[in-house]
Image (tube, grey):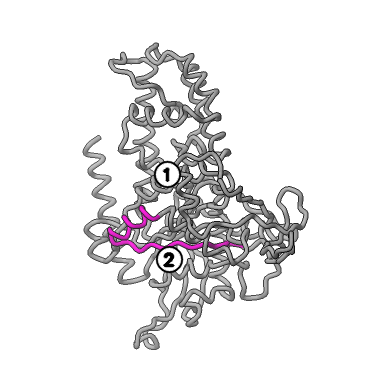
Amino acid sequence: MVISTLADGLTRSVESVGDTISETFFEPVIRLGVTGLARSGKTVFITSLVANLLDRGRMPGLSAVADARITAAHLQPQPDDTIPRFDYETHLAALTRPDPHWPESTRAVSELRLSLKVRPTCLLGGVQGPRTVHIDIVDYPGEWLLDLALLDKSYAEWSAETLARLETREEALPFRTALRETDALAPLDEPVAQRLAAAFTTYLNAARDAGVYDCTPGRFLLPGDLEGSPVLTFAPLPPETGAPRRCLWREMERRFEAYKARVVKPFFRDHFARIDRQIVLVDALGAIHRGPRAVEDMRGAMADILTAFRPGTNSFLARLLRGRRVDKILFAATKADHLHHTQHPQLTAIMQALTRDAASRAEFAGAATDALALASVRATTEDSLRHDGRTLDCVRGTLLETGKQAAFYPGRLPDDPSQLLTPARDGAEKWLDGDFQAMQFAPARLTLKPGEGPPHIRLDRAAEFLLGDRL
């Protein structure tokens, strides 16, 4: 087992060195990771980004487009034959059909390669001709990324932390009831283990639907082909000292360790550790609407996510000696089109405040970070309405639930982010200055001119930060 592990690690190191040399001297590859928690808009972001790089009429903020240095773009088969292809064509069709709808959300890892022909900017550019730059976009659920924090925890530690969080959550009541009826020191009874794991999985799904973000293990929410397997049939139990062999507690501990070894570590090794640019999408408006608890949960989840990154510089020698590092991280508050543009600076400031500590650590390690508010596909238009003698800056769009057109004013975001973060940290039940409302809009019907991708807000600026220096 040890020899096999060492041989596998040596093989991967040799392959990494070969890839690094090939990318440096021949055709550069940018591996862009796209992640975020549920309903943050990962699928729509990737679809719109690719569409707007293929037809670049709406990308003036990307310097390679503004300078007319991208001469061609096309999709190619991704290099990883064992990873599902991101279904770009189906997702784009969902957004551009006569009765558009939002595409299906991320359920597993997928990948897409977009290749660009780019004219060099150096003096020899006219002699050298265009070069090819490959962008490998890796889409993966943020819930899986939260699992990386489990690698440094024992089963007893994870159980104690998880059970402490469940004490005050209504969504956990059925699981807590099942837990009280369970003897953790009794011999393993598989139906008992399955019922307890099912109750815990039900809690995780209910908690996520209620706006809770610290829902681990992430594969319990998106199991894929592991559904029903022993590696996903465990639950937290109160710590026990001297638990006998073959009892329920010991078996739960064994399955927890198997989950780390066979699910979490392969994900980190095969996908996450190979990324060198990263965007983290966040539905900050949805969390603010759900209240202070949701904002604090989201802040904690973001901290856990960002501690999983390996930030640093990605020079040639650094990649040879230390492997890839994530050298640029962008934190993006999505659904900016749900706000009038006059409130976008406040949303950006909130995003910066939510990720300040993690961003500082990344920058200290040598990675560049940024935060902005964006809309991958713009679903609304702006409007102004008179109400109680004052003018309200609104957005107008098609409501997702009813299909009716409506003008919407969500409320005013504070200029100072601490007005949200402080009560969230202090455990406030609701906002003192009134609630911020959120609305779900359906995608607008698109009429795209030749050479134009879907309308967006600041997608070109996001692309410039993530890719601009490599183009």
What's the distance in space between the residues labelled 2 and 1, CA to CA?
25 Å
Residue 431 seen in this snapshot: yes
Label 2 SS: helix
**Image position, residue 276 (x, y; %):** 36, 60
Q: For this view, does 382 lie left or right of residue 30?
A: right
The amino acid pointed to by label 1 is Gly
**Image position, residue 385 (x, y; %):** 73, 64
The quadrant holding residue 146 is top left
* Residue at the image position 52 percent from the left and 20 percent from the top: 195
State yes or no: residue 332 in magenta. no
Q: Nearer the viewer, mark 2 or mark 1?
A: 1
The amino acid pointed to by label 2 is Leu
* Residue at the image position 48 percent from the left and 58 percent from the top: 416
Which mark, by number, is residue 466?
2
- Viewer-closest of 223 and 346: 346
Residue lying farthest front? Answer: 389
**Image position, residue 345 (x, y; %):** 52, 64
State yes or no: residue 373 in magenta. yes
Mark 2 neighbour class, 10 Å CA radius: few under 14, some 14 to 19, many 20 or more: many
Rendered-image quadrant of the C terminus: bottom left
* Residue at the image position 26 percent from the left and 50 percent from the top: 11
Residue lying farthest top? Answer: 186
**Image position, residue 257 (x, y; %):** 34, 31
Which mark, by number, is residue 151?
none
Mark 1 neighbour class, 10 Å CA radius: few under 14, some 14 to 19, many 20 or more: some
- Viewer-closest of 210 and 83: 210
Query: The magenta stretch spans which residues?
Result: 356-377
Q: For this view, does 323 lie left or right of residue 297?
A: left
- Circle 1 residue: 300
* Residue at the image position 37 percent from the left and 87 percent from the top: 127
